[in-house]
Image (tube, rainbow, N blue to C red):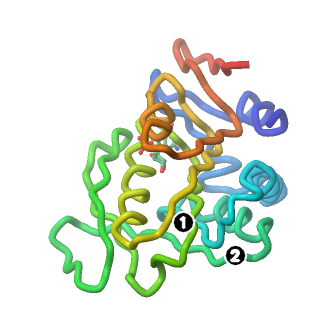
Amino acid sequence: MQLLKDRILKDGKCIGTDILKVDSFLNHQIDVALVAEIGREFARLFAGLGVNKILTIEASGIPMAYATAHAMGDLPLVFAKKTTPNTMTDGVYSAEVRSFTKGTVSHVIVNQNYLGPDDTVLLIDDFLAHGEAASGLAEICRKAGAKCVGLGAVIEKKHQGGAEKLRKQGLKVESLAVITSLADGKIEFDN
Ligand code: 5GP
C-alpha cells in the first residue's frame, strides 16, 4: 500500500535494528483517514472468505481492526485482553504471548461468550514481527472451535520470520507494508 509506505518513510523512526516506531500516525496519535484506508484494503484482500468476526489484541491493534470490521460490513470486533500470568482464567479462552519488543510474557484472554464454533475469524494487528501475538490469537480461536482464516498485518518486519511461521499454520497472511531491514536507521521495503 503505497500511501502507507510513503508515510512510514516520512514519519517512521527506527529504534536499533529491530523496532520501528510509528507513534505519530498509528500507535499513539492516529491518522484516522489512513486507518480507514487500511481497513478498506484489508476488506478487499480478505473478501469472499466468509469472515464474520474480527479479532485483535489490545491496545494498538484496535484502531485498524475497527476500521476493517467497519469496511467488511460492520462485523463484530473482539479484542483479546492482556493479563498477568496468574490472573483467574475461568470463562475465558487464553494463550501465552511472548513480546520480543518488551521482553515480557503475557496471557491474552477472550471471554467465551464472544468467540465460538459459528465464527470465521480474521486476525488484524498493527505489526507482524515474530508472529507470537498472532499465534496466540489463532490458538484462542482453536480453543473456541472457531475457524481462523488469516492475518492482516499493517506492517510486517519480514526479517523477523513471523509470516512464514503463520503461513505454515495454514493462515493467509497479508501485510500492507513489508519491511526487510531497519539496519543503520534506514527502512527498506521488499518492493
Ligand atoms: P510479534 O508477536 O509478531 O513478534 O509482534 C507483534 C506485536 O508486537 C504487535 O502486536 C506489536 O504491538 C508489537 N510490535 C512488534 N514489533 C514492533 C515494532 O517494530 N514497533 C511497534 N510499535 N510494535 C511492534
Could you tell whether 22 is left or right of 78 in the image? right
CB of mark 1 near ligand 1 (< 8 Å)? no
Could you tell whether 10 is left or right of 134 in the image? right
Q: Position of residue 103 (x, y in %)?
A: 28, 42
**Compared to 177, does 113 lie above or below?**
below
Looking at the image, which residue sits at the far left?
A: 86
Front in this rendered view, residue 172 or 93: 172
Front in this rendered view, residue 171 or 82: 171
User: Toward which corner of the image does residue 94 lie, by quadrant?
Assistant: bottom left
Which part of the image, by quadrant, shows the N terminus? Answer: top right
Which part of the image, by quadrant, shows the C terminus? Answer: top right
Q: Secondary structure at mark 2?
A: loop
Looking at the image, which residue sits at the far top?
A: 184
Q: Position of residue 157 (x, y in %)?
A: 54, 30
What residue is shown at x 36% (from left), y 58% (from top)?
Answer: 139
What residue is shown at x 30% (from left), y 47% (from top)?
Answer: 98
Could you tell whether 174 is left or right of 112 in the image? right
Q: How many marks?
A: 2
CB of mark 2 near ligand 1 (< 8 Å)? no
Which amino acid, mark 1?
Answer: Leu
Which amino acid, mark 2?
Answer: Leu
Q: Secondary structure at mark 1?
A: strand
Q: Which residue is mark 1?
A: 55
**Compared to 17, does 130 lie above or below?**
below
Q: Which residue is mark 2?
A: 75
Give the class, few, some or many, for how many residues have Cα within 10 Å of label 2's Cα (few <14, many ≥20): some
